[in-house]
Every structure is written in C-alpha cells, then in structure tokens.
C-alpha cells in the first residue's frame, strides 16, 4: 500500500500524472517556439512534473537507484525553472535559464518514458532486453537530440514580453 492505495493503483496514478506532464510539457515547448507564455499550461506542466518526481520517491525500493537519481536531478532542475519563471519573472538571463530548465525537465520525463517502454512493452523489450542495445540507445539519442535542438531554438524564440501584473 502506498498512500492508502494498492501498489498497482498508485503505479497507474503515477503513470497518468507522468503522461499529463509529458503532453502538457510538449504543449508548453511548442508555445515557447511561438513566444507564447501559456500560463495555465505551464503551471500544469510544472505541477505534474514535480508530482511525477515526488510520487516516484514513494515506491518501495531498496537503496539508491538510477530512477531516484533522475528524480533528484529533475527536482533540482524544476526548482530552477520555478525560480526563473515565478521568482525572477523571466527577467534578463532568467528567460533562457527557464527555457533550458523546463525543457530539461521535460526531457527527463521522456527519458523515463523511453526506459519504461523498453522495459514493459514486449516488442520493444525484445529489441533491447538489457537496455544497452542499439535500438534503446538510438531511441534515447533521438529524444535527446529532439529536445536539444528545440530547446536551443526556443531559447532564442521565447520572448513573451513583460509579465502582466495580477
């Protein structure tokens, strides 16, 4: 039992939160490419990405695992994104720092998605049963290149103007 739920139910909740984080993150990324602030989508992306990392720590594990390491690094990156966006209001260099942090957090979500897909989807697992075979490495490299290229473009294009006072 985790938070009063069966491990299966909690895993399902964690996966749903993770998928929402990825979808909303992609929406935010493409918004950045159009220099759109998208405050609602951005808040949902950041909140679900934080929740993805936090819920990942609640699974019963023995010792420190690579998944926990990804969670720690992701939370640090998310802290930087949150400070850049809500604390520093994207002023000056905080704009591109936010873009880099937000896209890195999204990439971490996709990194875990690819790992889980190769572990859980039978046809993918058959291609890379150990997680170090060429199909797995190519999938990770393509994902990293995708986010790196779009991240650099977004860092130049995301200029949403001054924040509106509330």
Image (cartoon, rainbow, N blue to C red):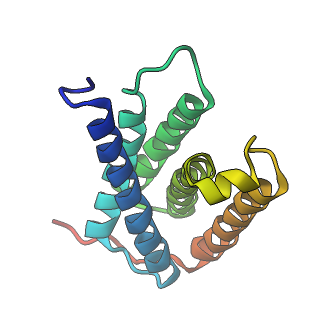
Location of residue 81 with respect to 51 vertically, above or below: below
Question: Which of the pair 116/152 is nearer the observer?
Answer: 116
**Residue most toward the top?**
63
**Quadrant in the picture for residue 163:** bottom left
**Residue most toward the bottom?**
34
**Residue most toward the right?**
134
Q: Residue at x 34, y 64 (%)?
A: 42
Location of residue 152 with respect to 81 vertically, above or below: below
Location of residue 159 with respect to 5 vertically, above or below: below
Count the labels in the image. 0
Q: Residue 15 appears at what percent x and percent y? A: 38, 49
Q: Residue at x 36, y 26 (%)?
A: 58
Q: Residue 132 appears at what percent x and percent y? A: 80, 45
Give the quadrant of the N terminus: top left
Question: Which of the pair 20/104 is nearer the observer?
Answer: 20
Q: Residue 124 appears at what percent x and percent y? A: 66, 57
Q: Residue at x 41, y 67 (%)?
A: 23
Drawn side of residue 101 relative to residue 56, left or right: right
Give the quadrant of the C terminus: bottom left
Q: Residue at x 64, y 76 (%)?
A: 153
Q: Residue 27 appears at what percent x and percent y? A: 41, 74
Location of residue 34 with respect to 10 vertically, above or below: below
């Amino acid at each position: 039992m985790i938070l009063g739920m069966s491990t299966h139910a909690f895993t399902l909740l964690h996966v749903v939160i993770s998928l929402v984080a990825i979808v909303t993150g992609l929406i935010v990324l493409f918004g950045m490419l159009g220099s759109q602030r998208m405050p609602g989508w951005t808040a949902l992306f950041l909140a679900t990405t934080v929740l993805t990392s936090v819920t990942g720590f609640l699974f019963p594990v023995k010792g420190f695992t690579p998944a926990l390491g990804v969670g720690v690094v992701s939370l640090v990156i998310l802290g930087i994104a949150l400070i850049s966006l809500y604390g520093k209001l994207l002023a000056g260099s905080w704009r591109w720092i936010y873009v880099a942090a937000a896209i890195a957090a999204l990439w971490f979500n996709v990194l875990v998605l690819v790992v889980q897909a190769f572990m859980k989807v039978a046809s993918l697992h058959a291609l890379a049963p150990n997680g170090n075979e060429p199909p797995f490495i190519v999938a990770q490299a393509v994902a990293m290149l995708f986010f790196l290229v779009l991240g650099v473009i977004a860092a130049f294009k995301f200029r949403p103007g001054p924040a509106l006072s509330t």
